[in-house]
Image: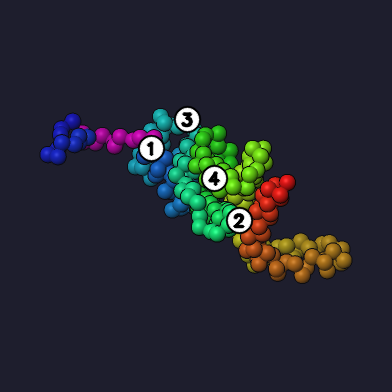
Amino acid sequence: MAGTAEGTVRRGRGRPPRLSREQIVRSAAELAVREPETALTVKRVAEAVGSAPMALYRYFPDRDDLLQAVADRVLAEAQHKDPPGDTWQERLRAWMHNSRDYLLPYRQLLPYMAATQQPARISSLVTLTRMLRPLKLTDDDLALAVALIGSTVIGHAVYETHRGPVSAHKLDALSEALAHYPQGEREAVAPLLARLPRAHSRLYDVVVDRTVAAVEALAAE
């Protein structure tokens, strides 16, 4: 290969660009955010990096291995700085909301984030431990609090992305299904249907408050 005037190496004519595992993972993460409704397949990622699917299999044995690597990267790059707040409760609420907002754009990767066996979550563990250390929890209770907070955040992100909005179409379908139930049950449930969208919009705030209350209870013990 010939060198350019700047001293860089130029690939030969017709030769495909050299790929790297890092380049593939980065492109797949960007694609997951840019096209959340498009299945993140090996073929689609290969198109995004301008290569053939077989070239990606040199780095990843299958699609699951690829998506796990992308999910681990996204988790590892999360910025887990202590959020502002006058109390640990305020800071924890802010951290849980910020973390959920960071995860939501990666809807296809959330199951892989939940299943990761890599130390990608270490930064969040460090931040939560530092945030909760003033509570003087035992090591067992501190571990429980950290596990509760982490599972709540990622679990609700999975729920939100797979549930989808409570649309008028869904409400109509629920009303139609409810018509097959006895009158007493119809009368009890029918008033709730129109209120479901509002309930779902409030849900995460309630979940966060209950999580904070659970940590407060551990501290009180």
Q: Is residue 35 magenta?
A: no
Q: Is residue 216 visible?
A: yes
Q: Kindly report the secondary structure that dominates the magenta region of the rendered protein.
A: loop
| Residue at disc 3, secondary structure | loop
Range covered by the magenta-colored residues = 12-22
Residue at x 63%, y 44% (from the top left corner): 136
In front of the other: label 1 or label 4? 4
Q: Position of residue 206 (x, y in %)?
A: 67, 59
> Quadrant location of residue 179?
bottom right
CB contact under 8 Å: marks 3 and 1: no
Q: Amino acid at mark 4?
A: Arg
* CA–CA distance in space, label 1 to label 4: 31 Å
Q: Amino acid at mark 2?
A: Gln
| Mark positioned earlier in the residue sequence (3 or 1) | 1
Q: Which residue is mark 4?
A: 130
| Mark positioned earlier in the residue sequence (1 or 4) | 1
| Residue at disc 4, secondary structure | helix
